[in-house]
Amino acid sequence: MRKFFWFLVLLIIVAVGGLLVAPNFIPASAYKGRIADAATAATGRDVAINGDVRLAFLPRFELVAEDVTVANAPGGQAEHLAAIGALGIGLELLPLLSGDVQVNQFVLSNAELNLEENVNGKANWDFEADADAAEAAANQGVPAEGGGDAGGGGYRVQNISFSDVRLNNAKLTYRDAAGVVETFDDVNVALQLEDLDSPLSADGALVFRGEAISLNAVLDTPRALIDGGATGVDLRLGGNLAQGTFDGTADLPRGGSTTIDGALDLDVPNLKRLATVAGQSLDDIGG
């Protein structure tokens, strides 16, 4: 989770940095290669923009790219980690000078996301940059994963805020290390974050095997998790299958195992239906 968080920040900053060196009179279509190269350097995966690109620099940086693909990890089952119908990014430029990343918009629309774990348990969304990608990122002065510093006096992220981060109408496929595949349709997620020391809220909904499920989550202090500490967690689950709440803490120590502790309250109106949707058999339990 921490690596994916810093990947998003790094991708936004390195994309902007790659664009700012281009003269403003160059048509937006000519930027496609720069944007794709910057994203490839940030992720260590081949990124392609196959559709149109629209750009604006004032009063803030805005980018809309259509038909974007991100290659899967080597040895992955799916062709792409992500195939995105439209990607929208909005970013305040002046606050970047003081290490303040203010994301006005980060929206993925009509995306197909293929999350996989190989037989060794390595996840394809774990963006461990190879030596060349890490060097390219450091040379552009972007933050390194883990401490927010690219090292050797590089760019340091002091704070991050999100005002419009959304995943719209996505399809998510997850393949575990044993090869079991699950698909989630109509995935919609919205994030809000005033700053790293304020609560991060996430509201989401999806359809799993024909059942609509909603989820609301609040992390009390995101900075604590990024720094390898613990923070309060509040979860709310809704839907016909089950309704529930969780109030507790999550701890992501560096180099250690993630621990979650708290109180779970779960109401399952029809356990037999829940078991059926989950692919289990509970014939001896009445509905």
Image (cartoon, rainbow, N blue to C red):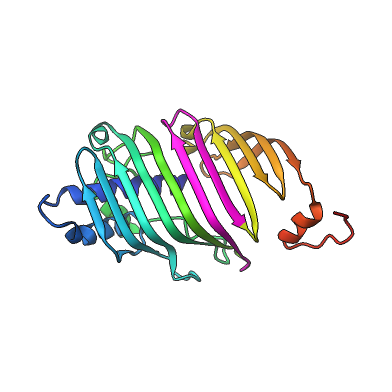
Residue at figure coordinates x 77%, y 46% from the top left: 268
Q: Vertical placement of 2 versus 286: above or below?
A: above
| Left or right of 17 in this view: 158 | right
Q: Vertical placement of 91 versus 272: above or below?
A: above
Q: Vertical placement of 131 versus 246: above or below?
A: below
| Left or right of 247 in this view: 205 | left
- Residue 32, how many percent across, how many down? 23, 60
Instruction: State the quadrant of the C terminus.
Output: bottom right
Magenta-drawn stretch contains 202 = yes
Residue 59: name its quadrant. top left
In-front residue for pair 5/85: 85
- Residue 265, how many percent across, how many down? 73, 37
Residue at figure coordinates x 66%, y 44% from the top left: 238
Report the number of discs. Answer: 0
Evaluate whether residue 189 shows in this view.
Answer: yes
- Residue 29, how many percent across, how many down? 19, 61
Evaluate whether residue 146 shows in this view.
Answer: no
Residue 127: name its quadrant. bottom left
- Residue 260, how many percent across, how many down? 64, 39
Please, which residue is most extreme toward the top here? 197
Highlighted range, magenta:
178-207
In-front residue for pair 261/245: 245
Q: Vertical placement of 86 versus 9: above or below?
A: below
Residue at figure coordinates x 48%, y 55% from the top left: 169
In-front residue for pair 116/268: 268
Residue at figure coordinates x 67%, y 37% from the top left: 246
Q: Main secondary structure of the magenta part?
A: strand
Magenta-drawn stretch contains 85 = no
